């Protein structure tokens, strides 16, 4: 599978051959992986355009979109997300739909109406989530690159579990227009790629202003690729206390990589941050509150597949019953924390904690350029291993702080065998350039190959 950079110099007929080849592979040898929810359609209008796999929550004009939920079956998007329009302006195109956790709620891609996606490293383990299809396909060599969305780690964590690169842009860097909202104040669309150069290229393509999203910044698109420099050295903060919650193998990978960073000229600083338990509590209160508001529109009347019913009440009930259990749970909890008697005790408090977390990152960035941390506390677990929702939520401890603070972060593999382990660089707001530079330098030093044969 060519990288995105390589694909950019392919001739139109070579790209078309590649698409045909991809379809064959997705239909046959890779079907079991279940990374694509259906075989992509080769379209005349996209002739010669480089195919990019798209998560099933990003609108592509005239193409079905379901967010891996029964409630959206039959929905065809009447418009394209701004990120998709920007792809098309750069001679790329949407190609295929990646499996995901329903509405982005999950960390394993087991909570999809299409069944679970498998990890290319071992079919018994999960690929991570919620952008698990996007990451598994890139890792297995059945996508050049893909777009995912990251509300609390859904790009970085599957990238880490599948041994690929995932970039969560600063909040407002990429338009959310056409991204089906889960938690609007936390999420961003971002690239999942075979290497750091491709992540930089794809970020430059999809970022930039958009009149249709008032939270999108008025900045021009990034131009990180032309400035990529693996030789730059930085002041890097490490949070040793933070990683006590990680498994031995993740801790070892972390310390080993810190040594490598030191050996290539970076300066390492020990820093402290508020206990990660606060990240989890405040994230899940805010995410569920916003989810309950955003998902209210799927009622079978305004949006969503209308279910049968004897009367209006039954139609509402039966239509909303099409949501999966995890989504229902979040709507209920979100509604609860926003209800008048509990708003101050939960939602308002969570917002205050969010401000403290943001401030703590700012304090670290007073004298450090970036933070280096694991992406997840363990390697990818076996499927069905997370018995309770709470267990699943704990796999997000290292990723969600970044979303609460709106910062950019990039996950890159530092170990590939027996199972991949990813680490992330977290940057100052809008400083994608330097985390890409640091990741590029580390990637070169570690020399880990990209795609993995399934
Ligand atoms: N696992 C987190 C959640 O379930 C993050 C999901 C995401 O980033 N979309 O909310």
Image (cartoon, helix red, strand yellow):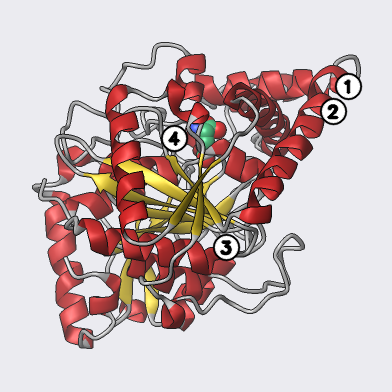
Q: Quadrant of the N terminus?
A: bottom left
**Residue beneath disc 1:** 344
Check if mark 1's residue and mark 2's residue have beta carbons within 8 Å.
Answer: yes
Label 1, label 2: how far apart the Cα atoms are: 5 Å
Indicate left or right for 31 with 183 as reference: left
Q: CA distance from mark 4 to mark 2?
A: 28 Å
> Given this view, does label 1 or label 4 mark the residue nearer the observer?
1
Secondary structure category for the residue under label 4: loop
Q: Which mark is residue 78?
A: 3
Question: For mark 2, what is the residue?
Answer: 348
Identify the residue at image location x=57%, y=58%: 369
Q: CA distance from mark 3 to mark 2?
A: 37 Å
Q: CA distance from mark 1 to mark 4?
A: 30 Å
- Which percent across, then down, holds residue 209? 67, 74
> Considering the numbered disc 3 on the image, is that residue within a helix, a strand or a loop?
loop
Question: Which residue in the protein does label 4 denote?
Answer: 101
- Cα separation, mark 3 vs mark 4, equals 23 Å
Sort mark 3 into few (<14), some (14-19) or many (20+) by Cα contacts within 10 Å. few
Q: Closest to the observer: 209 or 101?
A: 209
Name the spot of residue 120 as percent of width and height, x first.
18, 41
Q: Nearer the viewer, mark 3 or mark 2?
A: 2
Neighbor class of circle 2 (other Cα within 10 Å; few <14, some 14-19, many 20+) is some
């Amino acid at each position: 599978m060519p990288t995105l950079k390589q694909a950019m110099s392919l001739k139109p007929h070579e790209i078309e051959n590649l698409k045909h080849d991809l379809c064959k592979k997705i239909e046959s040898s890779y079907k079991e992986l279940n990374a694509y929810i259906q075989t992509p359609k080769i379209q005349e209008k996209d002739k010669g355009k480089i195919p990019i796999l798209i998560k099933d929550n990003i609108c592509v004009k005239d193409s079905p979109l379901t967010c891996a939920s029964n409630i959206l079956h039959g929905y065809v998007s009447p418009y394209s997300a701004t990120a998709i329009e920007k792809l098309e302006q750069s001679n790329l195109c949407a190609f295929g739909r990646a499996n995901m956790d329903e509405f982005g709620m999950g960390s394993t891609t087991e909570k999809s109406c299409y069944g679970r996606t498998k990890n290319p490293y071992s079919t018994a383990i999960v690929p991570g989530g919620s952008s698990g299809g996007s990451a598994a396909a890139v890792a297995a060599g059945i996508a050049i690159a893909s777009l995912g969305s990251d509300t609390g780690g859904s790009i970085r964590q599957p990238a880490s579990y599948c041994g690929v690169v995932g970039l969560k842009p600063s909040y407002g860097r990429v338009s959310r227009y056409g991204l089906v909202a889960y938690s609007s104040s936390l999420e961003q669309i971002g690239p999942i790629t075979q290497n750091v150069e491709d992540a930089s290229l794809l970020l430059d393509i999809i970022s930039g202003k958009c009149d249709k999203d008032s939270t999108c910044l008025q900045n021009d698109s990034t131009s990180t690729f032309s400035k990529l420099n693996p030789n730059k050295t930085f002041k890097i903060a490490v949070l040793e206390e933070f990683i006590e919650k990680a498994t031995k193998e993740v801790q070892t990978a972390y310390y080993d990589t810190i040594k490598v960073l030191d050996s290539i000229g970076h300066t390492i600083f020990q820093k402290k941050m508020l206990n990660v338990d606060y990240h989890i509590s405040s994230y899940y209160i805010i995410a569920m509150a916003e989810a309950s508001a955003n998902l209210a529109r799927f009622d079978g009347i305004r949006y969503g597949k209308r279910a049968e019913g004897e009367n209006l009440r039954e139609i509402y009930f039966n239509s909303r019953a099409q949501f999966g259990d995890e989504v229902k749970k979040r709507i209920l909890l979100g509604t609860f924390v926003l209800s008048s008697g509990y708003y101050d005790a939960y939602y308002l408090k969570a917002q205050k904690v969010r401000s403290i977390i943001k401030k703590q990152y700012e304090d670290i960035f007073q004298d450090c350029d970036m933070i280096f941390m694991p992406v997840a506390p363990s390697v990818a677990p076996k499927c069905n291993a997370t018995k309770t929702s709470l267990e699943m939520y704990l796999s997000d401890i290292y990723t969600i702080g970044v979303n609460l603070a709106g910062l950019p972060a990039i996950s890159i593999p530092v170990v590939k065998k027996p199972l991949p382990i990813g680490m992330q660089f977290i940057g100052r707001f809008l400083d994608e350039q330097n985390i890409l530079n640091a990741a590029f330098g580390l990637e070169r030093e570690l020399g880990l190959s990209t795609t993995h044969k399934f």
